[in-house]
Amino acid sequence: MTDPARQPWLHDLVCALSATTQVWCGPDGDVGAAAGPRGAEGVYEGDVRVLSAVLLDLDGVRPVPVLTAPDGADGQLAVAVARHLGDPAPDPTVRVERRRRLAGGRLEERVTLRSAATVAVRTLVRVRLVSDLAPMDDVKQGRATRSLAPGAPLGWSGPDVRVEVGAGGADVVLDETGAELRWPVELAPGQAWTATWWVRAHDAAAVLQAPPAPAGWGAAVRIDSDDVRLQRWVSRALADLEALRLAPVASPADVVVGAGAPWYLTLFGRDSLWTAQLLLPLGTDLAASTLRALAARQGRRDDPGATEQPGKVLHELRRAPADWGEFQLPPVYYGTVDATSLWVRLLHDAWRAGLPDAEVEALLPQLEAALAWQEGPGDADGDGFLEYVDTTGSGLANQGWKDSGDSVQWRAGGLATAPIALCEVQGYAYAAAVGGAELLEAFGRPAAGHRAWARRLRTAFRERFWVGGPQGWPAIALDARKRPVDSLTSNIGHLLGTGLLDAGEEAVVAGHLASPALAAGFGLRTLSSDDAGFSPLSYHGGSVWAHDTAIAVAGLVRGGFDAEAAVLVDGLLAAAESFAYRVPELHSGDARTDVPAPVPYPAACRPQAWSAAAAVAVAAACAEATARGGTALPRTRAAWR
């Protein structure tokens, strides 16, 4: 392994993605290095790194990189020059291009040499390939891996995984640590030469696969906005969302959107549900298939090791157990407090958006089981609130969307102790109970108990969560002693539109969301800058998440708070432009007066599903405001289908 201090950050790498395959290369266009893997660099199939190095040289000399960039969601272009070849002039005369494209579970790289030299060019083009078949969790944790000897025909094999490589016209040399593809090349002045090689992997243990057909979102959506940044963001986001689509092997028609690349290219309860929720303007197909995929894996028994309970919706699905260092998770893990309520809410909202009755009715048994979970095991101590605690010692300590270990902090500093009841989770649960009851009643099923449960929750929330008087805010959580954890956080934005707050309380929350303490950066800060634990590059303690901001924007516009929404939208659009419209999972919460652009969070996934879906949600909110005559937000018209 190379020195970890010298390995590139995830932010510095270039990604090409077509689920379930992805490739991450360095700024030089190579994958890995001669000394070993460089951090997350690699070619992956699902949760396995099938190539840990792809290295190109000419006569043993590496060309000098000029440009390495994404070429659409599923491609990369790397351009370099061979300074040791061609004319001895100041300008380079031999150019090297590498174009990579992913399709159908296969990576193809086309290598082209172009000569503008006045003399003939002779060289030996070599591409070295190395594989370690490392599991994703080993890569993420930086654990040492071992290069594997290739077999003939060219490829590698391990438990459940088989890798094939093809290279037209190349001489192939194998050794104990890899393979080398060699092409002798001779170019006359002005000539070009091209060769192609490819790699494909087969994983017998895969639980997810490429979807059977594209969604076609990019061609179906038209955005006309006064702010061209919004149009560009939506266009890029839709391409990335297309590339993130996955299908369960057991039910290929139930297409979902994987959470993000590289680490989370799989089915996540919360992430996949929120992505489908934010993409409802595009139609109900994704919502329906996401609901079905999760319903098929809804908890059926009590399994403390997986935190499975009857009616509970899973947190994540993997091909094998994963050791993420600070926690170890089984292949199907249910450690999430919010996915079950979000599943119910999506079913209701998709029905209201036009999901056919027959598809809704088929999911009513799972709806009833989900409501029973949130009113029963989800409220383990019977106090009327949903709470969580990791009883395994090896699972997630925090089980809301802010799932890092330090995400629930007191305003003066220090961490809250579990069991923890998060404020936004109570909003999700209230909306689920009310919406679920409406659905059940529409199909002739009893629902009065759910409405009564929701009324009790609404009353208790107002009594227990609100801090700081009438102009205060909902606490982020109640701790183990039922004390309100008083930090001011972005979580309160998720309460808008759930029905848990009255109109006056929503107005107070709207004011806080647009205040300098939360909104002075490039979007909505996860933690107020007035709180002791604030840090602009803290994962959940001061950074900005695009989806979190978009959820707040949607709630603000729905409540008529366009001016407050405009503050957040302006910050997000500035961030989108800075990131070439591929907005990462999160970025820094630095004030815009302090930095000219958002500082990247070095290990953020990019592309990431709900960050991309945020573009659609923001465009929909702007279009909604425009339709009713609002002028604070960019004037926007959207055609979604």
Image (cartoon, rainbow, N blue to C red):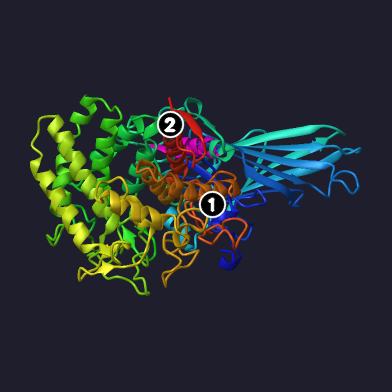
Measured as percent of width and height from the top left, residue 2 is found at: 59, 64
Is residue 453 or residue 106 the one in the foreground? 453
Counting other residues with Cα less than 10 Å from the Cα at mark 2, is it few (<14), some (14-19), or many (20 or more)? few
- Which residue is identified by label 1? 149
Counting other residues with Cα less than 10 Å from the Cα at mark 1, is it few (<14), some (14-19), or many (20 or more)? some
- Looking at the rendering, the stretch of residues picked out in magenta corresponds to 233-246
In this rendering, is residue 219 above or below 566? above
Helix, strand or loop status at disc 2:
helix
Kindly identify the amino acid type of the residue bearing the numbered disc 2.
Ala
* Screen quadrant of the C terminus: top left
Q: Residue 162 has which mark?
A: none
| Disc nearest the viewer among 2 and 1 | 2
422 in the magenta segment:
no
Q: What's the magenta bit mostly, secondary-structure-wise?
A: helix
Measured as percent of width and height from the top left, residue 369 is found at: 15, 43
In this rendering, is residue 264 above or below 469? above
234 in the magenta segment:
yes
Q: Residue 627 has which mark?
A: 2
